[in-house]
Amino acid sequence: MTARIPAAGPADSGTEDTDRDRLPPARLAFPPSTWKEIAYLLANLPVALFGFVYVVTVLSVGAGMTVTVVGLPLLAAGLLGSRLLGRLERARARALLGVRVEEPSPLPLRRAKGGFGRLWMVLKDPVGWRAALYAFIRLPWGILTFTVVVPSLFVLWPVLPFISRGLSNVDRAMARGLLSPSDELERRIAELESDRGVVVDTAAADLRRIERDLHDGAQARLVNLAMGLGLAKEKLLEDPDAAAAMVEEAHGEVKLALQELRDLARGIHPAVLTDRGLDAALSSVASRCTVPVKVTADLDTRPAEAIEGIAYFTVSELLQNISKHSGATAATVDVWRSEDRLLIQVWDNGRGGARLEGGSGMRGLAERLGAVDGLFVLDSPVGGPTTVTAELPWRDRSGTPAGGAGGHRG
């Protein structure tokens, strides 16, 4: 006998279809955004646990030790770490939840005065405190999301996309509410307070410089002049020739004193800047530079006097640096207006290597421009050339920002 092996028929096919219907839906059928949300929610617990432990440990220890010398620095370091945690959380939300949370502006620590000023700026940083609050309240939420999502992976599979979307929307709201730079007003106030300190310090330094120049320069010469004329008066009848020589010497001292007073007045605010504007004033200061300088100014109107003065003294100090330190054989100064900004570019073909932290006064210039909402960019590779680009807000002579565009650089 030949045994028959039954062929697969309709009954077998029906059994396979029944088994296929009993299987759960394909897990990879979810869109990628759902899987990213699930991954974010599952990671909430370990991330929140780390952040909670960090905040409670570092900030509580720092606050508890404020009676000692290390308490405040430790608390400040903890807040800086909270800022870093906030940055990592914004990156995680951006990558997995697709929520765009702008990065807060960095702390302007360089503008703070001294170590205590920097410490106080960190301690009153709202970004650090709100990031710490975010890390503190995340632990119960991380436990909740983990305990909801894990069982849903096996029990509530068909509605898992809706669960993950609802929970992740809460995460999106928390990230936007506590990690977004909505403290822009507070940050701006802090910057303005710091800038005010820079302006006050700069004004005090300028007054000390003027006092020193008057005391050591013109005042000393005038005292010598008075003494010389007194001696000449005494010798006028006894020795007329000696008296004439003293008068001649006094005349030379008067000329030198007048020149020093003119230089001092030019250092305070040059008359050519007031009378003829930035183009003529920059040409005048360029003519005194030891390096040939080509000046190009493309300005249809004159900016406010304060902005004009800052631009003039910025270029003046840069040209002095070129004369003293660059070893250049050629330099250019370009000034133009671009919409509501006044731009200055000073270039030289010298040896380069200038740095903001050096002793060439570059950092002081950067701080002065920053105090009036300006920018200062230095590009000076070793071997040269050196290019300094300064940017100032354009304000009309009425003192209000201009809305239209003026001359543009081609």
Image: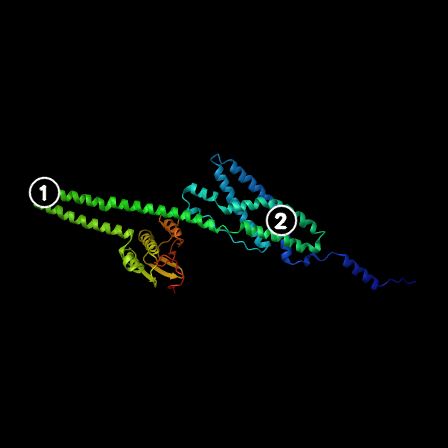
Of the 4 image quadrants, the one containing the C terminus is bottom left
Relative side of 111 to 252, left or right: right
Q: Does the rendering let one see residue 253? A: yes
Residue 78: image location, x then y, percent: 52, 42
Residue 283: image location, x then y, percent: 29, 59
Residues packed near mark 1 inside 10 Å, few (<14), some (14 to 19) or many (20 plus): some
Residues packed near mark 2 inside 10 Å, few (<14), some (14 to 19) or many (20 plus): some
Residue 30: image location, x then y, percent: 67, 58
Decide which of 7, 165 is in the foreground and name it.
Answer: 165
Q: Is residue 56 above or below residue 3?
A: above
Give the residue pinned by disc 2.
43
Which residue is at a point 23% across and 50% down the rendered structure image? Answer: 261
Of the 4 image quadrants, the one containing the N terminus is bottom right
The mark tally for this picture is 2
Relative side of 240 to 273, left or right: left
Decide which of 59, 137 is in the foreground and name it.
Answer: 137
Decide which of 328, 169 is in the foreground and name it.
Answer: 169
Q: How is the image coloured?
A: rainbow
Residue 377: image location, x then y, percent: 40, 54
Of helix, strand and loop, which one carries label 1?
helix
* Disc number for residue 177: none
Which residue is at a point 17% across and 45% down the rendered structure image? Answer: 225
Q: Is residue 297 above or below residue 193?
A: below
**Type of amino acid at the residue the image marks with label 2:** Ala
Cα–Cα span, label 1 and label 2: 98 Å
Q: Residue furthest top?
A: 68
* Disc number for residue 235: 1
**Type of amino acid at the residue the image marks with label 1:** Lys
